[in-house]
Image: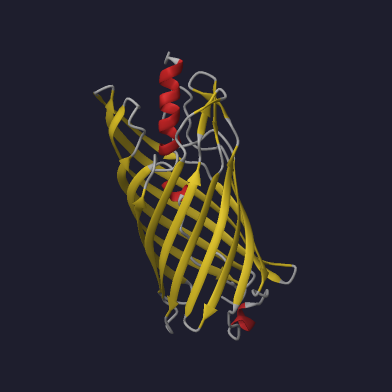
Amino acid sequence: MLSTARLRSFCMALGAIGLSGIGAAKAQDAEPRSYSNTPVGLNFLIAGALYSKGKLAFDPDLSLADANFHSKTGLLAYVRSFDFAGQSAKFDVIVPATSFLAWGLVDGLPRERAMAGLGDPRFRVSVNLIGAPALSAKNFANYRQDLIAGVSLQVSAPLGLYDSSKLLNLGNNRWSFKPEFGISKAVGSWTFELAPSVTIFSDNIDFIGGNNFAQAPFYGVQGHILYTFQSGAWVALDGVYFSGGRTSLNGVKSDNEQRNTRAGFTVALPIDRQNSLKLSTSTGITTRTGSDFTAIGVAWQYRWGDGY
């Protein structure tokens, strides 16, 4: 059994790891065009892969050093667009499967943890409030974007692989809720987007032998500058900033609040009327008690439904 002091040390570490290799695909998302207009009545099937690697930065007082990781994540997602009060809206579900390896020094001795399996699935409802009228695919051809504003709520369910005897897991054994507000302004072929959000966590009440692991909310904002070509292809410069996430063990708070900044770009290429390909990459710019990693992703999208 780990001592209380050691558990608190690892609690501080997990605050960083939870937002790094294991959670990179969800916690530091940069998602351009999240609040664009979409014809209603369409279905989207998305298959993607994400590779990330990097270092984990901990408080120097901890007994953890030279911590590195790499992860390979496969994603399967389904999206459905629909009419909500005359504006376009979407529902999506994402199921990740990850192979994760972390290694480093604990008290000067080498340690590693390898795991593979399903992560926590995510469910989200996004509703545009203004500027994105609900249109059929036939009528959508005449639509031109100006200003769009919308809101979304993403919920992560504790259904991923979790072993309460292990410090690192692919599943978090807790719920998370992420409300977000987004605006998108089009100026000719350019689009400018901004989306602040907060991520709230329930407690993990079965952390290493029944301990209570809690985490304060994360406050984040993502921004994007996009250029769309006549062919329908587009490129985006992405930026993400988030802070917060201080952890506590059995009510005792740790000094591990995070303040991290990331930047990257995304390229989307239409293949035909129903298929498209998206490529993305991102890297850390500034890191305080968290992760400094690089991620590369690719996703294929197939759409079908009314008018397709």
The picture places residue 73, in percent across and down from the top left corner, at 39, 47
Asked if one can make out residue 67 in the rendered structure from this viewpoint, the answer is: yes
At 45% across and 71% down in the image, what residue appears? 225
Q: Quadrant of residue 133?
A: bottom right
At 57% across and 53% down in the image, what residue appears? 197
Task: Report the colour scheme.
Answer: secondary structure
With respect to residue 244, does 8 lie above or below?
above
- Indicate the quadrant containing the C terminus: top left, top right, bottom left or bottom right: bottom right
With respect to residue 269, does 296 lie above or below?
above
The picture places residue 16, in percent across and down from the top left corner, at 42, 38
The picture places residue 44, in percent across and down from the top left corner, at 53, 64
54 or 97: nearer the viewer? 54
At 47% across and 27% down in the image, what residue appears? 163
With respect to residue 105, does 183 lie above or below?
below
With respect to residue 294, does 14 lie above or below?
above
At 42% across and 47% down in the image, what residue appears? 24
In the picture, measured across the screen, residue 103 lies left or right of residue 189, that is: left
Asked if one can make out residue 166 in the rendered structure from this viewpoint, the answer is: no
257 or 194: nearer the viewer? 257
307 or 252: nearer the viewer? 252
The picture places residue 57, in percent across and down from the top left corner, at 34, 39
Q: Residue extending furthest right?
A: 85
- Indicate the quadrant containing the N terminus: top left, top right, bottom left or bottom right: top left
In the picture, measured across the screen, residue 278 lies left or right of residue 151, that is: left
